[in-house]
Structures are given as C-alpha cells and as structure tokens.
Image (cartoon, rainbow, N blue to C red):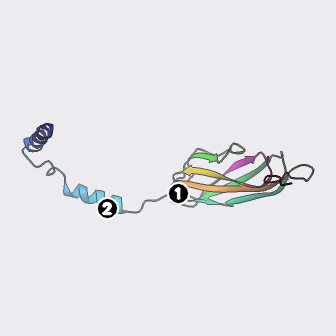
C-alpha cells in the first residue's frame, strides 16, 4: 500500500509541472560541460633531487637529518597540504604551505632519531594537489648498537 502511494506521489510530481522536467536543460551547456570534463587538466608535478636517502651505518641513539629538495615541473601551482611519516621516529618539518609556482623550488627537512637495530627504512608521504594526490620519499640506515654486539634477531636456541 505504501509503495502505491509513493508511486502515485512521484508520478504527480513529475507530471504536475506540465512540461518535461528535462526540457529546460540547454544543449549548449551540456556540450560545454562535456568538453570541459573531457579536456586534460593541468597539474603540478613534484620533481625531487632525490627520492631516497641512506644515512649509512649509524650508532643507536644518534639523531640524523637530511633535506629533500623539489621543483614544481608541472603547469599549475603546487600546494602541499601535509607531510607525514610512517612513525614518530621520523619527523618531516620546515615545509612551505604557500603555493609553489611552476619552475619554483623548495625543500623540507626530515629528522630521524636513529634508534633501533639493523637495517631500517621509513617512508615520508607528501599530500599535494598533484595528479596522484600523494608523493613519497624514503630514508634508510643501518643502526649499530654501541659495543658492536647486536642482540639476536630470534629466540635463543641452546
């Protein structure tokens, strides 16, 4: 019973206007919208001086720092909304929130606390208005324990 009521109400709404509700759409507007939606958009492109930085062998507890430089090689202003890392031991900072025009360059710093053991790598993700929406860079290091003896990686078998 409810379904019939809703069906009647819908048919009254659609026919109550008298004219076809789609007759008011101008065909030239549809053509302009189709052309706009099918044309390639211009995006900024982040080109880095390096996408990976290896700190090499470091001692446990030794803070490290590197700078990633980038250039907007695209055709639109680049806007970075966020830069974050995969963990709290890697901190990106000093990046500009102002739009970077095509051809301009900038940089940001990545600080790594250098704690742990063995080979480690961290990813820093940049959210920007590029075509993919995100870009990334990586840092890595081999961390040595003081005294040169590393604890075993697995259970001790005696």
Quadrant where the C terminus lies? bottom right
Q: Where is residue 62 in the image (x, y as percent from the top left)?
A: 84, 46
Q: Position of residue 135 (x, y in %)?
A: 58, 56
Q: In this view, does 88 lie to the left or right of 40?
A: right
Of residues 99 and 40, the one drawn nearer to the viewer in this rendering: 40
Q: In this view, does 145 lie to the left or right of 10?
A: right
Q: Which residues fall within the magenta stretch?
A: 97-120
In the picture of the structure, the residue carrying the numbered disc 1 is 44
Instruction: Name the residue furthest left.
Output: 18
State the residue at coordinates (14%, 36%): 2
State the residue at coordinates (59%, 51%): 126
Q: Where is residue 108 in the image (x, y as percent from the top left)?
A: 68, 49
Of residues 146 and 99, the one drawn nearer to the viewer in this rendering: 146
State the residue at coordinates (52%, 57%): 44
Quadrant where the N terminus lies? top left
In the picture of the structure, the residue carrying the numbered disc 2 is 35
Cα separation, mark 2 vs mark 1, equals 22 Å
- Dot 2 and dot 1 residues touching (CB under 8 Å): no
């Amino acid at each position: 019973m409810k379904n019939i009521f809703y069906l009647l109400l819908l048919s009254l709404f659609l026919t109550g206007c008298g004219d076809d509700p789609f007759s008011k759409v101008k065909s030239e507007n549809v053509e302009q919208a189709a052309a706009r939606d099918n044309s390639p958009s211009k995006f900024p492109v982040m080109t880095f001086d390096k996408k990976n930085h290896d700190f090499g062998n470091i001692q446990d507890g030794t803070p490290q720092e590197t700078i990633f430089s980038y250039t907007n090689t695209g055709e639109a202003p680049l806007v970075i909304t966020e830069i974050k890392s995969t963990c709290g031991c890697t901190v990106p900072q000093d990046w500009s929130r102002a739009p970077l025009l095509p051809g301009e360059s900038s940089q940001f710093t990545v600080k790594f606390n250098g704690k742990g053991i063995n080979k480690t790598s961290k990813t820093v993700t940049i959210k920007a208005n590029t075509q993919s929406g995100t870009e990334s860079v990586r840092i890595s290091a081999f961390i040595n324990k003081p005294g040169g003896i590393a604890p075993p990686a697995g259970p001790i078998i005696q």
